[in-house]
Each structure stands twice: as structure tokens, then as C-alpha cells.
Image: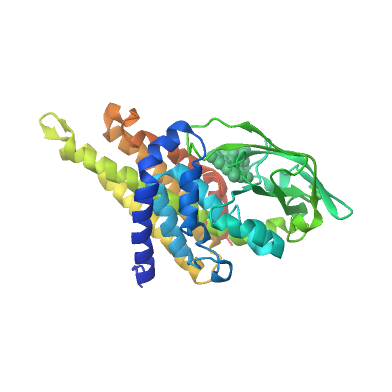
């Protein structure tokens, strides 16, 4: 057994920590406060090549392994969940289908600029009436000559009103449920494609979330990414990676909150002692650190399996479930340690408390993940 990171992974973490501590951290509070897309910061991080982290060298990527990508997500979340939501969308879900199925033209015009931070991408599964149940997707794609015509609405879409392009999941035949799904590329400015309402929310602010509308939206047939009806199958290939990525976010956010809680417990005095001397506070510290370490182990174990070519279906579900629930547990405990100051804007812990909720939904809710874990266990 070996619990050590490689030299390259350690070097990556050191460099990336320096970068985000300098470029993102000083603005984390502001990004949350104003709740608008941070274009300048987005471009700066892109110009340093970080959105290409998972992609191979032949398209200008860093060709990093899943463990390194997890380090990236952990350190991002330690600083800003809002920016982490934006950056991870750009690195993974927002661009992956263009990489796997895009024509040369799509790769040159959209994918390569996106991994340099010059264009913004996103993905759209969720609809007003369905989230977890992808088989119930209603957005319809109909072939007409050498075009597809899209009709439907998507909701809860990250970067909805700022994205230059979106990978849309639509159905060719709703009666086929998951077997009717396909992925399509739609570019901003396409006739019949609009962004609708913005969702005002308490978590991951600055990573703007909204609605996309397709009203007789015509796209070239070459914008079909992959084959009709194979959408659910293609998704399986990146679902573990998405779950490990969000588990990494959970570890990073929990780490930031835990460190803040420990520091406060050593400084704040009550009844003539620092509060860290009280056994009931120590109980919180002990439980938080144990759960944080367990999240860390599950998350990096799943990434390690992925790096060895395994799908890690159960392990990635366990990592995402445990790490995100733990992040929510830790932000709750830490805000209690802070007493009234736990809800004061003056401290970051109030932002951590709000941001932890964001982790519970994308990539599968805890209920869905437990269903998967049990299904895999009982096989
Ligand atoms: C900030 C943010 C950004 C997002 N960005 C995107 C994006 O960019 N693109 C995108 O497509 N989506 C995005 N989403 C949506 C996200 O993927 C969905 O929230 C998620 O898939 C869950 O769907 P839902 O919220 O509709 O919940 P539902 O699926 O309606 O579930 C509601 C409740 O029922 C439970 N439930 C559902 N089915 C079962 C079952 N079989 N067994 C037990 N319990 C069940 C769920 O666990 C949950 O508790 C985003 C969400 C948020 C909060």
C-alpha cells in the first residue's frame, strides 16, 4: 500500500495553491456577494492552462490523471465553491462531449478556445420537471434533412446566460426513456435558442444558474455528439469522474471550514478559558477531523482506482455521498463553534455553510447515490 502522492502531484498542488491563493482567494467573498460571473478571473486561470487539465497533450492539454484533477478540485473548493463550480464545469462536463465526439471544426473553434478560457461551455440535462430521472427528459430533438430541430426547456443550468455553447441532452423518442437520449451542441446566437430566468440562490453564487429555452432551434446534424439513443451510455463513462470531482470539492470545503473552526476554538474565550478546552467542543473537533479524513481517503481511493482504469462505480458514489454529507456536517459544527459569528458575513464560515448545500445535488443526490451503492453491493 502507498498513501503518498507522486512528485508530480505534489508539485502540481504547490503551484496551483500559489496560483489560486493569489488570483481567486482575494475575490472569493466578492464573487459570492455580487453573484455575477467573474470574467477576468475566469480568463486568467484559463490563460494558465488549468481548464485543459484532463485533456491530452495533442489538443494542448495537461494530460493529468484523476488524482491530480481531484487535487485541483479540492484546492479550488478550499478557496471558493463559486469559482470551483465554474472551473470544473469548464474542465469536465461543459467540454467533455466536444472532445469525445466533436468534429475537427468543433474542436478547433470551440473546444480549444474553451480550455484556454476564451470561451465558456456548459451542459444541460435538468428540466423544470425532472432532475434525477433523466429518462423523463422532455426536450425533443427531431431530425429534418441535415438538421435537428430542438424544442424544450432546461433549468438549473450553470453559466446559462454567459455560456458560448452548451451540450444539450434531448430525447429522440420519449417512450424509449434512457435509450432515447442523445447529446447535441448548441451555440450562442443560434436562432430559437435563448437564455431565460436567472435562479437566485444561496449557494455557489457567482456561478450563475438559469434557464435555457429551445424554440424550434435548428442545428446542423453534425452537432449531434455521438449517436442517437446512446446518451445514457456515454454519460456512464464520465459519471464516476463527476462524482469524484464533487467529492474532491467536499473535501476542500470541509478542510477550509475545519481549519477555521480549529483556529477559532483556540482563540475564543468563555468562562476564563479558550473554548477548545471544553470537552463538548473537543468532541466536535474529534468527530470532524475523523470524518474529514474518511472523506479524503474515500475520495482519493476512488481517484486512484480511476487512474488504474477501473470504472469505480460504487467507490465514486460512496466518495461523493460521504464527502458531501460530511462537508455539510462540518460546516454545521463549525458555525456552532463560532457562536453568533457563525452567521456573520464578516467570517467566511457563513459562506461555507451556504455553499455546502450546492454539493448535494449534481452528480446524484445522496438518496440516488445510496441506491447505487446498495445496488452494487447486492450484485
Ligand atoms: C447550483 C446548481 C447548479 C446546477 N447546474 C446544473 C447544470 O449545469 N446542468 C444540469 O443539467 N443540471 C444542473 N443542476 C441540477 C442538478 O443536476 C439537479 O439538481 C440534480 O440532478 C437533482 O435533480 P432535482 O434537483 O430536480 O431533484 P429531484 O430529482 O426532483 O429529486 C427531489 C428529491 O427526491 C429524491 N429522489 C429522486 N428520485 C429518487 C429515487 N429514485 N429514490 C429516492 N429518492 C429520490 C432526491 O434525492 C431529492 O431528495 C444544478 C443544480 C444546482 C443546485
- Is 278 placed left or right of 247 in the picture? left
Q: Residue at x 33, y 46 (%)?
A: 256
* x and y, in percent, of residue 30 in the image: 41, 35
Q: Is residue 13 above or below residue 82?
A: below
Q: Quadrant of the C terminus?
A: bottom right
The reply to whether residue 318 is in sight is: no
Tell me which residue sits at (30%, 45%) in the image. Answer: 258
Examine the rendered structure and indicate whether residue 95 appears above or below residue 261: below
The image quadrant that residue 221 belongs to is: bottom right
Image spot of residue 264 (x, y percent): 23, 38
In the figure, residue 127 lies in which quadrant? top right
| Relative image position of residue 152 (x, y in whole percent) | 75, 39
Single out the residue that lies furthest toward the right: 145
Image position of 273 (left or right of 216):
left
Horizontally, is 234 left or right of 207 in the view?
A: right
* Ligand 1 visible in quadrant: top right
- Quarter occupied by the N terminus: bottom left
**Pick the front one: 10 or 164:** 164
Q: Is residue 153 visible?
A: yes
Amino acid at each position: 500500500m502507498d498513501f503518498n502522492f507522486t512528485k508530480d502531484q505534489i508539485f502540481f498542488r504547490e503551484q496551483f495553491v500559489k496560483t489560486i491563493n493569489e488570483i481567486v482567494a482575494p475575490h472569493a467573498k466578492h464573487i459570492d456577494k455580487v453573484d455575477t460571473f467573474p470574467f477576468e478571473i475566469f480568463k486568467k486561470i484559463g490563460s494558465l492552462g488549468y481548464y485543459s487539465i484532463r485533456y491530452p497533450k495533442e489538443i494542448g492539454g495537461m494530460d493529468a490523471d484523476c488524482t491530480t484533477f481531484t487535487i485541483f478540485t479540492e484546492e479550488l473548493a478550499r478557496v471558493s465553491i463559486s469559482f470551483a463550480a465554474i472551473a470544473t464545469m469548464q474542465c469536465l462536463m461543459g467540454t467533455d462531449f466536444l472532445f469525445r465526439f466533436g468534429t475537427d471544426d468543433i474542436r478547433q473553434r470551440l473546444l480549444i478556445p474553451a480550455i484556454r478560457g476564451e470561451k465558456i461551455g456548459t451542459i444541460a440535462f435538468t428540466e423544470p420537471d425532472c432532475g434525477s430521472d433523466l429518462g423523463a427528459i422532455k426536450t425533443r430533438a427531431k431530425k429534418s434533412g441535415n438538421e435537428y430541430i430542438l424544442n424544450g426547456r432546461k433549468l438549473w443550468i450553470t453559466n446559462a446566460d454567459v455560456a458560448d455553447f452548451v451540450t444539450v441532452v434531448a430525447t429522440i423518442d420519449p417512450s424509449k426513456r434512457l435509450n432515447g437520449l442523445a447529446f447535441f451542441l448548441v451555440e450562442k446566437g443560434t436562432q430559437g435558442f435563448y437564455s431565460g430566468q436567472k435562479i437566485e440562490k444561496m449557494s455557489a453564487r457567482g456561478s450563475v444558474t438559469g434557464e435555457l429555452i429551445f424554440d424550434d432551434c435548428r442545428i446542423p446534424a453534425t452537432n449531434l455528439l455521438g449517436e442517437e439513443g446512446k446518451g445514457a451510455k456515454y454519460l456512464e463513462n464520465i459519471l464516476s469522474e463527476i462524482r469524484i470531482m464533487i467529492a474532491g470539492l467536499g473535501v476542500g470545503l470541509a478542510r477550509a471550514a475545519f481549519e477555521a473552526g480549529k483556529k477559532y476554538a483556540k482563540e475564543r474565550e468563555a468562562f476564563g478559558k479558550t473554548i477548545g478546552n471544553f470537552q463538548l467542543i473537543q468532541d466536535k473537533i474529534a468527530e470532524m477531523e475523523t470524518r474529514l479524513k474518511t472523506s479524503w481517503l474515500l475520495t482519493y481511493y476512488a481517484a486512484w482506482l480511476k487512474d488504474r482504469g477501473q470504472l469505480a462505480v460504487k467507490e465514486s458514489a460512496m466518495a461523493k455521498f460521504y464527502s458531501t454529507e460530511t462537508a455539510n456536517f462540518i460546516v454545521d459544527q463549525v458555525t456552532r463553534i463560532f457562536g453568533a459569528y457563525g452567521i456573520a458575513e464578516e467570517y467566511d464560515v457563513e459562506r461555507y455553510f451556504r455553499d455546502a448545500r450546492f454539493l448535494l445535488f449534481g452528480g446524484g443526490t445522496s438518496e440516488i447515490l445510496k441506491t447505487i451503492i446498495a445496488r452494487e453491493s447486492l450484485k
